[in-house]
Amino acid sequence: MKSNPADYTDLDPEKLPAHVAIIMDGNGRWAKKRLVNRVKGHEKGTNTVRTMVRTSRELGISTLTLYAFSTENWQRSKMEIAGLMALLKKFLKSEQKEMLENDIRLNAIGEIDRLPKGVQQELQNTMNITKNNSGMLLTLALSYGGRSEIVKMVREIALAAKTGQIGPDSITPELIARHLYTKDMPDPDILIRTGGEMRISNFLLWQIAYSEIFVTNTLWPDFSKEEYVQILKAFQGRERRFGKTES
Ligand code: IPE
Ligand code: IPE
Ligand code: MG
């Protein structure tokens, strides 16, 4: 029988990644190709977000982290930022029901207090109503920057040192991880970037130390469930050595 690339049965349920992180890139180029406003690309991109959340949940992935807006993205035009924020608010409202039905808990990481008040309220509201869900943790990285996260961590640790709570020897990788936004999550097993750029763009700098990286040229609005499953299959074929020799 010819194998269907979207066929979940091809995936080994024992070897699924616990944490998938995605840099959702290419909405602007998708819009440009069609001679429409960039915000139209972001709008189309929210459909892909819905599909990826659903598929990840169906597969039984326990943690999905999506890079939706970076600290650097504040430098875009007022119009594009306003369009993105409006879409985010709309998305949160429209997905609440599905998150509840599918046992998904919403979480947000980044400088959340920089977001417009209305967005912060909708985020808080969605996080509250989903807080007891445990099927999948969906984290949106919003106004997120890996360097700003590291600065926050260093400040917290410096304060603990200054007040005598810890000494230099207490500073370990585990302590550092406990001061990051991702303190309760495993590190990403996979980092996927759509849109073809071979770069990290300030995403999860500490946490991706040993993530398997997949970059696809597909633009985020065109990214499909089939391609996602193909990437997961390729992940299952990779040997993760973590610096050791092959087993
Ligand atoms: C990613 O798409 C979404 C955000 C960064 C908010 P882009 O808007 O960066 O799309 P391109 O890279 O310009 O195509
Ligand atoms: C990365 O995409 C940020 C998000 C996907 C939210 P960018 O489009 O902002 O990254 P660069 O500018 O290509 O590095
Ligand atoms: Mg981009």
Image (cartoon, grey):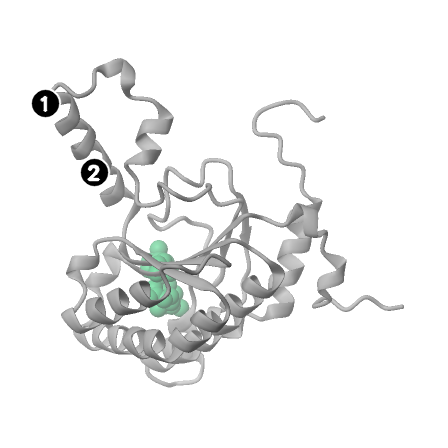
Task: Identify residue type, mark 1.
Answer: Thr
Q: Secondary structure at mark 2?
A: helix
Q: Amino acid at mark 2?
A: Val
Ranked by sequence position, the earlier of labels 1 and 2 is 2
Image coordinates of residue 123 in percent, x first then y, are 27, 67
Residue 215's x, y, as percent? 53, 54
Q: Is residue 87 left or right of residue 54?
A: left
Q: Determine if residue 32 is in view.
A: no
Neighbours of disc 1 within 10 Å: few (<14), some (14-19), many (20+): few
Quadrant hosting ligand 3: bottom left
Q: Is mark 2 within 8 Å of ligand 2?
A: no
Residue 235 in percent (x, y) is at 64, 48
Q: Position of residue 44 (x, y in %)?
A: 43, 79
In three-dimensional space, the C-alpha distance between marks 1 and 2, rounded to whole angstroms, equals 18 Å
Check disc 1 and report the residue beneath it: 163
Per the image, label 1 sits on a secondary structure element best described as: loop
Q: Which mark is residue 51?
A: none
User: Mark 2 = which residue?
Assistant: 151
Q: Quadrant of residue 167?
A: top left
Q: Which residue is at a point 47% across and 63% down the rendered structure image?
A: 195
Residue 79, quarter of picture: bottom left
User: In front of the other: label 1 or label 2?
Assistant: 1
Total marks in image = 2
